[in-house]
């Protein structure tokens, strides 16, 4: 395949692999080709991105509130009237009573009881005889004497066995016993007699009945009457706005012509540079080997969409953005 044929295949695969142009779109010249093209230049049909402009608009933040303002206060007339709460009345009350103080003595005899002091003991360690000293026969290996035996001697029997008469010493054991040091003591205790004086008031003469007149009870009741009403007016507040930046579409996305790389400039070295530039910018073109492949065309399409570039062909504008032209 010639170099020009490779370029045509590359451009077609870029456009169709990215899904940006129709497979039926031809690359031959037509009546809508740009008239300003110079000899040696190549143009391809591309999808031109939309063009936006930023404009400042006023956005309503808060609507002005209407308030009521007092122009002239109301005139109020206040009247105080005394109102009867309880009328005067006559009551009978008891006069002062006469009392005297009486002292009463209460005698409480002392209590008698026995105070017991317990016995006191101490522990005594005693040596108790368990087995008395005694003599007993024990077998031995050789005879020591003949005739009548005494303690510590041996007797020789006809069987040839030898026994010794041995003195066994007494055997003792130790035990602890509680020994009374002082016996229990009982002492009679007599508490002293207690005397208590209680003072109390005793009524001698009841108070006499006295007639008293209680005065009437009044309270002040305040009444208010509006003689002239208040005058008010409604005042409208100012609305609050803020300036915001909004993007406005100047030109919608459409189809057009863009200058592309001609077949003579497409080589394996050029594709190697394109793949390396895509990889360094985070767009995976597949292996960086200078061979065209679908993964490279998809990476070119993603790069053009993210940078708002013309899509569908490997344009000169894309080459400048990648730094390979």
Image (cartoon, rainbow, N blue to C red):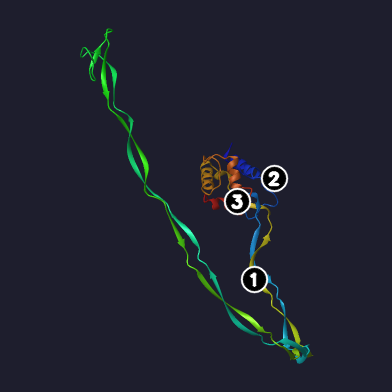
User: Do tag 3 and tag 2 residues touch (Cβ < 8 Å)?
Assistant: no
Q: Which of 255 and 20 is in front in this view?
A: 20
Residue 304 marker? 3
Q: Residues within 10 Å of mark 3 (few under 14, many from 20)?
A: many
Disc ID at residue 22 = 2
Q: Can residue 164 be seen in this view?
A: yes
Q: Which residue is drawn at 55% across and 50% down?
A: 319
* Gap between marks 1 and 2 measured at Cα: 46 Å
Give the answer, above or below, for where 187 lies relative to 285: below
| 224, above or below 9, in the image | below
| Total marks in image | 3
x then y, percent, for residue 87: 78, 89
| Cα distance in 3D space between marks 3 and 2 | 18 Å
**Residue 63 screen position, x and y as percent:** 70, 73
Distance of mark 1 from mark 3, alpha carbons?
A: 35 Å
Residue where numbered disc 1 is placed: 242
Closer to the observer: label 1 or label 2? 1
Specify which label sits upstream in the sequence, 3 or 2: 2
Depth-wise, is mark 3 or mark 2 nearer the camera? Answer: 3
Secondary structure beneath dot 2 equals: loop
């Amino acid at each position: 395949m010639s170099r020009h044929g490779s370029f045509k295949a590359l451009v077609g695969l870029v456009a169709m692999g990215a899904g940006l142009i129709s497979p039926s779109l031809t690359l031959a010249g037509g009546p809508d080709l740009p008239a300003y093209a110079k000899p040696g230049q190549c143009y391809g049909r591309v999808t031109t991105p939309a063009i936006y402009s930023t404009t400042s608009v006023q956005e309503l933040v808060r609507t002005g509130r209407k308030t009521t303002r007092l122009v002239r206060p109301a005139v109020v007339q206040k009247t105080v009237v005394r109102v009867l709460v309880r009328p005067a009345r006559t009551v009978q009350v008891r006069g002062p009573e006469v009392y005297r103080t009486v002292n009463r003595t209460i005698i409480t005899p002392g209590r008698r009881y026995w105070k017991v002091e317990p016995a006191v003991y101490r522990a005594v360690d005693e040596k108790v005889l368990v087995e008395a000293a005694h003599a007993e026969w024990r077998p031995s290996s050789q005879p020591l004497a003949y005739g009548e035996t005494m303690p510590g001697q041996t007797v020789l029997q006809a069987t040839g066995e030898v026994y010794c008469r041995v003195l066994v010493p007494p055997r003792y054991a130790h035990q602890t016993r509680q020994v009374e040091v002082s016996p229990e003591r009982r002492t009679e205790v007599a508490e002293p007699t207690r005397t208590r004086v209680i003072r109390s008031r005793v009524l001698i003469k009841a108070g006499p009945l006295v007639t008293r007149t209680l005065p009437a009870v009044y309270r002040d009741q305040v009444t208010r009457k509006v003689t002239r009403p208040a005058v008010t007016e409604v005042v409208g507040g100012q609305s609050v706005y803020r300036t915001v930046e909004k993007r406005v579409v100047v030109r919608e996305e459409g189809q057009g012509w863009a200058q592309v790389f001609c077949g003579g400039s497409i080589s394996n070295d050029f594709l190697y540079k394109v793949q390396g530039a895509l990889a360094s910018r985070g767009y995976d073109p597949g292996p960086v080997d200078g061979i065209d492949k679908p993964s490279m065309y998809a990476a070119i399409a993603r790069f053009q969409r993210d940078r708002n570039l013309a899509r569908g062909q490997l344009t000169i504008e894309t080459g400048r953005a990648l730094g390979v032209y």
